[in-house]
Structures are given as structure tokens and as C-alpha cells.
Amino acid sequence: MKVFDVIPGQFFRILTGKNRNVYVEILLSLRKAFKNELYIDKESLVNIFAECLGDLMIPIDIEAELQEAESDFTDINIEEPQSITWSSMAHLILRRLRDTNWIEIEYKQRSYDEIVTIPPYSVSMIEFLYSITQENTQSYKSYAFNTYSSLKTVLSDDSEDYLFTALESAYTNCSLLLDSLKVLLNNIRRYHQLLNNSVATNDILKNHFEGYQVLVNERIFHPLVTRDSVLRFKVPIMTMIDKIRSNEELRKRIVVLGIKERQCNDMESGMEELSQKLYEIYDTFEGIDRLMQEIQNKNTAYTKASIDKMIYILNYDQSVKTKLADILMKYSYLDEEKKDIVSSSSVKLFKQRYIDEKSLYCRSNRKIRSFEPPEKIKITKTEHSQSELNDFLKSVKSLYSHQQIFAYMEKEFGSRMVLNSRELDIKDDRSFVLLLLATMKSGEKKTFYDVEFLNGYIENEGYRYPNMRFIRKDEENNDKPMD
């Protein structure tokens, strides 16, 4: 079914006109009445609309509203703008909502009293508008825990009647989890863009502490890495999915319940749909590490960028020389009309070109040969005390201690049992040295991993090291994993 097979053609007219801000507030007041009352009386709703119009600080373009109403209504007389009152305006708005199919008017049973009903598509759209205005109250729901709990219910012996419902709940929460993580990633990018557009320290502090810290970090990011850690529930969820997959009798019982609830057409299509949902849940949690790492990197980058921007603004040179340099840097991005305005002022600007070492041609520098012998370079010896050398050695050892090496490997392993050298994040000399030392320590008793060397070498960010894999020692699994 297509969208406009359900939604009428004139549905969005009120949200595209000049008074769209007024209609949004009217729809929110309609939502409030819908939540509080079982039946919405027409006259009561007119009074609610009139009160809402009186409380609004938004100016209403009455002439534009009358013109739009004339194009919608054919059976009413439009009053002059001077005689319009809040009550008559409320009646006009209610009729426009009716004619654009946002609401419907019907009569009570055994009565001539008119009541207002709201179609399902209107309820969904009004809830969507309301959710946009409630960004400061949104918070992360425990989607990972809910997925885990639902799958646990499927495998429970006491939940025969709720097998299909529990599996549907697990699938829904898994989808919501993935959507929530993607929204979080995009939200961090949005605040990063706001940071780039900020030019004052007060704007940066407000966006960071009142916006990012409260709406993103505390409500969404912090629960994701603490009480509802996705990585914490990853392995148990994948294990339970494997158990359901291997139990054909259980899957058949789930599909039978789905057929009874009219959610599945037949056994064959139901089994196929169930397998697809199990695969999607498993695939989501199997590849969720990369998305979580991307979110972590974005969060770290935003925090670092906020500090750097604050330091830059606080130390920014406000002299005339700096402002003139800013004008010259932005001059090339102006269009020809603005360039003429700047050039017509007292400051004359001209285009300047130059040839440097990156150009296609550079004139060679003339060298004047000298027949005099070159002066000898004096080499001075610098002596260091033994204590300075000892301090230097201690500082180097602290960077590459046993704890630092094992902490680096624990971070790279994460929840994996096998770590291939192709997956390592070698970003600087320190991580490269830690990798080499970790390889050398593989034979020690206290090391929690073994090293298996493979064929060839790895080229990564300019660093070259052997192709190998690290295997976590596990007393329960004596056999090494296969490639």
C-alpha cells in the first residue's frame, strides 16, 4: 500500500501555508484533548482552539488564511478581516482541519451532538510533530536488555503461550537498538557541526553542557556503555539465537502461534520469515562492534574539538592585522559583485600569483662557487649525569611496561577470542612498539594469549609487520579456532 493511498491529497496544506506555525500549535492542543478525553465534543474543541489562539505569541496572517480557506471551502461565507474574532477563527480552523481530513465529524449515538474523531494517520502525524518538540526529554531505552530478556523468555519452559510474542519483541527491540545507535551517531555529527559554526565561547559552552552533555552523553551514550552495554549482551544474545536456530521443534511451535494470531499465513512462509528475523538479530549484534567503535571515536573527536576550539578562541589574536588577514582569506570566496564592493572602498585589492616548489616550473637558484676551503664543523660533546640517564630509562620503561602491553592487547581483543593482525589499529610508533613487545611476550606464562604466525606481511599506515593472529587462552576450549 502506498502512502497517498491512505493519506488524502490535501492533508499537508495546513503545514505548507503562511500560518503553518499556528497550525502546529493547534494540532498539539488537539493531541492534548485527545489524550485527556474519551470523546471530544465539537464545541469544547472550538473553545480549546480559541484559547490556544489567544495564548499564542505567533502573529496570524488572517488575509492569507481567508484566501486559503476560500480555496478549500465552497459552502461557507467568509467574514471581513476586521470582524474576525478568536471564536470565529477557531471555527474556521476546525473546518479546515475537517476538509483537509485531519479530523472527522460524527454524531453521538441517539443524539444530535457532534463529536470529533481523529483518523489513525492523523494520530501518527500529530505524535510525530510532538516527538520533534520533545528532544530534551528523549532518553535511551534499554533495547539491548529488552532483546536479551525476550529471547530468554522464548527459551523458557514456562512461556509456551508467549513464544511468538516474545520473539517479535526481541526483533522489534533489536531494530530499535540499531536505529537508536545510528541516530546517536548522526546526533554527535550534528553537534560537531554546531561546534564548527560557533564563534563565541558562550555558544560553545552552552551547546556542550546544556545540549550535548545532557541530551546525548547522559541520556543516550552513558547508558549504552554502562547499565545497558551492548557489548555485554552481545555474546549471550548470539548464543540464544544459535539455540533457537538448532531447535526445529521450538521454531515450529513459534510459527504455529503466529498463525493463530494471524501474523503468519502458513507454516512454510512462517518458518522462512522466522529464520530471516533470527538472522537479522544475529547479524546486528555480530557487527555492532564497528558501529559502537565509530560512536566512541566520534564522541572522543567531539570532546577534543570542543577543547581545541575553546583554546583557539581564548588565544585568538583580535588585532587589526589578524582581522585584515581574515578579510584577505575570505575574499576569494566572494562573488564578483561583492568583490567589486570591497575593491571600491578605500582599500585597493589586487590579485597576486606566485610560483613555488609545487608549481609546474621553478627557476633554479644560481650557485656561486667558492674556492675557499669550507669551515670545519665544530662538534661539541654534551655530558649527562647518571641520574638524568636513569630518569630517561625509567620514563621509557613506564611507556612499555607489562601493564601497558597487556592493557593494549586487552583493548584490541575486546570480546573476541581470535585477533588477526590485519584488524589492529596501528596509528603511531607507540602502538607499533607495543605490538612488537606483545608478540615477544607470547611465550611467557602470565601472557593470556598465544601467537600464530601466518604467511606474508601486513602493510598498515606505513608500518610493516608479520601476518599473524593472537589467540586468547581459554581453559574450556583447548582447540584453536580455525581460519
Image: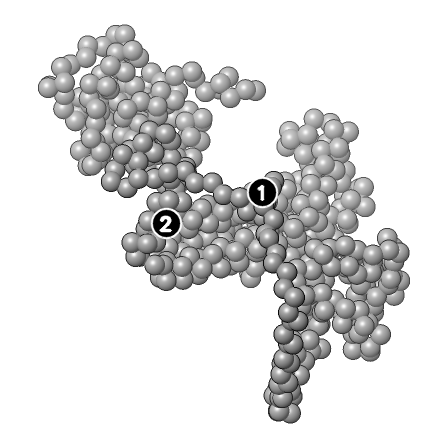
The single residue placed furthest to the left in the displayed view is 82
Quadrant where the N terminus is found in the figure: top right
The structure residue drawn at horizontal position 42% and vertical position 51%, both measured from the top left corner, is 195
Query: 70 or 403, which is in the foreground?
Result: 403
The single residue placed furthest to the front in the displayed view is 371
Q: Are marks 2 and 1 in contact (CB under 8 Å)?
A: no
Whole-angstrom CA distance, mark 2 to mark 1, is: 24 Å
How many C-alpha atoms fall within 10 Å of the one at disc 2: few (<14), some, or many (≥20)? few
Place of residue 367 in the rendered image (x, y in percent of width and height, measured from the top left): 61, 56
Residue 436 appears in the figure? yes
How many C-alpha atoms fall within 10 Å of the one at disc 1: few (<14), some, or many (≥20)? few
The single residue placed furthest to the bottom in the displayed view is 386
The amino acid type, in three-letter code, at marker 2 is Ala
Place of residue 197 in the rendered image (x, y in percent of width and height, measured from the top left): 39, 47
| Label located before the other in sequence (2 or 1) | 2
Label 1 sits on a secondary structure element that is: loop
The structure residue drawn at horizontal position 54% and vertical position 20%, both measured from the top left corner, is 2
Query: 371 or 466, which is in the foreground?
Result: 371
Judged left or right of residue 306, residue 371 is right
Query: 158 or 143, which is in the foreground?
Result: 143
Does residue 193 lie above or below 466 as drawn?
Answer: above
Which label is found at residue 372? none
Residue 165 appears in the figure? no
Quadrant in the picture for residue 341: top left
Q: How many marks?
A: 2
The amino acid type, in three-letter code, at marker 1 is Ser
Query: 196 or 98, which is in the foreground?
Result: 196
Residue on which disc 2 sits: 325
Residue on which disc 1 sits: 359
